[in-house]
Image (tube, helix red, strand yellow):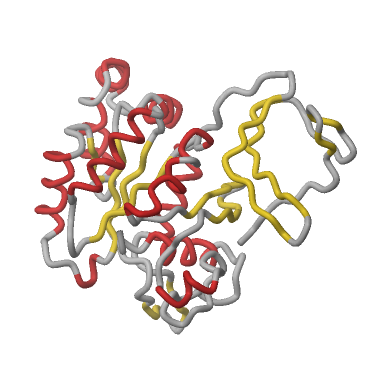
């Protein structure tokens, strides 16, 4: 709750060049919180999709509510995720609801990144926040701000396969790290802030940790295997006038306009961005 999920999402869209400006919840100009009630209350109520490309990888993400009152809206999207980013506030740290979300991600077997936001105004030091994460969420949380050699040593202790590779080669391959992440053997932790820009050499720089998170998403994420036959998971139904919009995650095969699925005919296909 209030950890800055939408602000982080807006920062990624801006850093990727999808948006010309960084949407701000306080200004009511975000691409994702578009409902009148959301803008008035300054919170996310409905899940929203968006997409950007990073290092040749198309990343499609869903910004979800954080408040317990809208937990059902959040939980509906969990089965469609290849990976998740759990956003924690550097002000409040790991609270009981954060633990509940982490257990849900474990239940749905979703590989998870942890982004500790608001570090520019955090009440706790980075080391204290990381200790909370390892104590209350997982002992296999790994601080990805470590230098490469130290990071690989930490990763090697999270998986028998990684340890064997490290002992043989004194280093770890991206494939090995990616496979271990997909199996939830470890949970990358990044620290930053999603709103405070800096200027270096007269060029505005993205907020701390945003680019690093995007690069890690592109580097470690891998899609789940897909079947040859048609399959899809419906996680939301909305309406636009008289039209029913069915939000699907494809799990196999193909889908085309005018195709009949059950008793319904596909009249339009949209790729949603905000």
In the image, taking residue 88 as reference, residue 46 lies left or right, namely right
Please name the residue shown 39% across and 59% down the image: 5
> Which residue occupies the foreground of this view, 130 or 205?
130
Q: Is residue 269 left or right of residue 232?
A: right
Question: Extreme right residue here?
Answer: 258
Residue located at (35% from left, 63% from top): 4
Please name whichever residue, 34 or 50, is drawn nearer the observer in this view of the structure: 34
The image shows a total of numbered marks equal to 0
Q: Residue at x 11, y 46 (%)?
A: 131
Residue 89 position (above or below residue 206): above
Image quadrant for the C terminus? bottom right
Indicate left or right for 201 with 222 as reference.
left
Q: Is residue 223 above or below residue 113?
A: above
In the image, residue 147 above or below residue 18: above
| Image x and y of residue 111, in percent | 39, 33
Residue depicted at 49% across the width and 61% down the height = 12
Q: Position of residue 40 (x, y in %)?
A: 45, 77
Quarter of the rendering containing residue 144: top left
């Amino acid at each position: 709750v209030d950890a800055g999920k939408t602000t982080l999402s807006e920062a990624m869209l801006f850093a990727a060049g999808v948006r010309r400006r960084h949407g701000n919840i306080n200004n009511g100009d975000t691409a994702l919180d578009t409902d009148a009630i959301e803008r008035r209350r300054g919170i996310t109520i409905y899940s929203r999709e968006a997409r950007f490309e990073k290092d040749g990888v198309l990343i499609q993400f869903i910004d979800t509510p954080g408040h317990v009152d809208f937990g059902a809206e959040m939980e509906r999207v969990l089965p469609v995720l290849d990976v998740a980013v759990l956003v924690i506030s550097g002000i409040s740290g790991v609270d009981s609801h954060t633990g509940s979300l982490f257990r849900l991600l474990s239940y749905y077997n979703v590989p998870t990144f942890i982004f500790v936001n608001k570090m520019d105004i955090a009440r706790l030091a980075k080391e204290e926040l990381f200790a909370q994460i390892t104590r209350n969420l997982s002992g296999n949380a790994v601080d990805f701000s470590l230098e490469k050699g130290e990071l690989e040593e930490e990763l090697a202790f999270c998986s028998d396969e990684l340890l064997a590779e490290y002992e043989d080669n004194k280093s770890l391959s991206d494939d090995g790290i990616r496979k271990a992440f997909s199996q939830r053997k470890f949970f990358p932790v990044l620290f930053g802030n999603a709103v405070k820009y800096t200027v270096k050499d007269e060029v505005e720089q993205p907020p701390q940790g945003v680019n690093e998170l995007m690069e890690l998403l592109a580097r470690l994420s891998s899609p789940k295997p897909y079947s040859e036959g048609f399959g899809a998971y419906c996680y939301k139904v909305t309406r636009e006038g008289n039209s029913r919009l069915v939000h699907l995650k494809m799990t196999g095969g193909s889908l085309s306009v005018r195709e009949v699925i059950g008793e319904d005919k596909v009249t339009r296909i949209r790729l949603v961005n905000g």
